[in-house]
Image: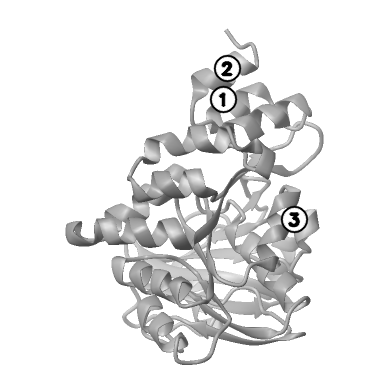
Amino acid sequence: MEELVKLAKEKKASDLHLVYGLKPSVRVHGSLKALDLPVLDDNKLESLAKELGVDITNLKEHDMAKTIDNTRCRINVFKQQNHISIALRLLSDTIPDISVLGLPKIVEEIIKLRKGIVLVTGETGSGKSTTLASLIDAINHTYEGHIITLEDPVEYLYKPDKCIINQREVGQDTESFSDGLRASLREDPDIILLGELRDADTIETALTAAETGHLVFATLHTNGAGDTIDRIISAVSEGKKDQIRMQLSTTLKYVLAQQLLPRIDSEGRVLAYEVMKVNSAIANLIREGKTPSIQNAIATSARIGNITMDNCLINLVKERKISKEEAVLASNDADYVKNALNIY
């Protein structure tokens, strides 16, 4: 495993895939490439799984995080067609400073918050974990406080500076996100990082935590601010929807939606983002259930730093960082983007 991870790092890969009957593959700048290595068989894959410390006797799937060749890795070992497969995400050796991520200046205001909820959303591999880690680490180096993280698995490892930091892994240190979150409220936290808002129980407890004076960070697999609100509301029972809308309208402070797109000006990928800082108008829309109007509210509140994903994509094309074609593919409203970029 150390040799494979070392090779993946040399290729500047974000992921390593080990699949029966195929050569090991790496994802570089979003594209999968096979390595010039022998095809993997059952014996090799079983040996690699055991090397990771995984009991393969009754294996279905196993999530874990491990430092391999001095690199923190998020790993999933699973079965497919009765063969073992391993998917491994290589994490950065250091937590990047928030100023180098490519996010707008307004995001730096988040570390000054003392309570409320901040959501970072996007598809898998969009950089959510890195953004959250950078925000948490910035707080760690700026203010005194107690930070509790609930992750599945623990990814970035923080070095306590001005803050006390407890990192808890779901399945190992606590049974579930909701159990760990409820327990954390009895552990005198100032800031709580939730790896994911997975279910209604976790959502309701997170909102309660924010209402009672805590700063809560969490992720969702949604593409934008409006989708994020809808996903949260749809997760709770019908009788609680109005209550959750009211709580969200008073506790939600920011939604950051992200995606990583291929650059055309250099090798690598560039961050495209949507930023919604909740103002009174947006809070009213959330409370009244008028989520379809949120996109327009974001677009018309640019003066406070808000920006829609589509307008960010248009800006990236004008800055010659991504292609017009990529902007259209990544857009929420393709016709709007095409019109803005004179694509007919």
Local SS, label 1:
helix
Residue type beneath disc 3 = Lys
- Which of 170/70 is in front? 170
Residue type beneath disc 2 = Lys
Residue name at image x 18 percent, y 60 percent: 239
Rendering coords of residue 66 (x, y %): 60, 79
**CA separation, marks 3 and 2?**
33 Å
> Circles 2 and 1: CB distance less than 8 Å?
yes
Rendering coords of residue 267 (x, y %): 78, 40
- Which of 216/174 is in front? 216
Q: Is residue 157 above or below residue 91?
A: below
Residue name at image x 38 percent, y 62 percent: 247
Residue placed under numbered mark 2 in the picture? 338
- State the quadrant of the N terminus: bottom right
Question: Which callout, 3 or 2, points at the residue further toward the start of the chain?
Answer: 3
Relative side of 145 to 237, left or right: right
Residue placed under numbered mark 1 in the picture? 328
- Which of 104/100 is in front? 104
Residue placed under numbered mark 3 in the picture? 12
Q: Is residue 37 above or below residue 152?
A: above
Local SS, label 3:
loop
Rendering coords of residue 101 (x, y %): 74, 53
Q: Tell me if residue 4 can be seen.
A: no
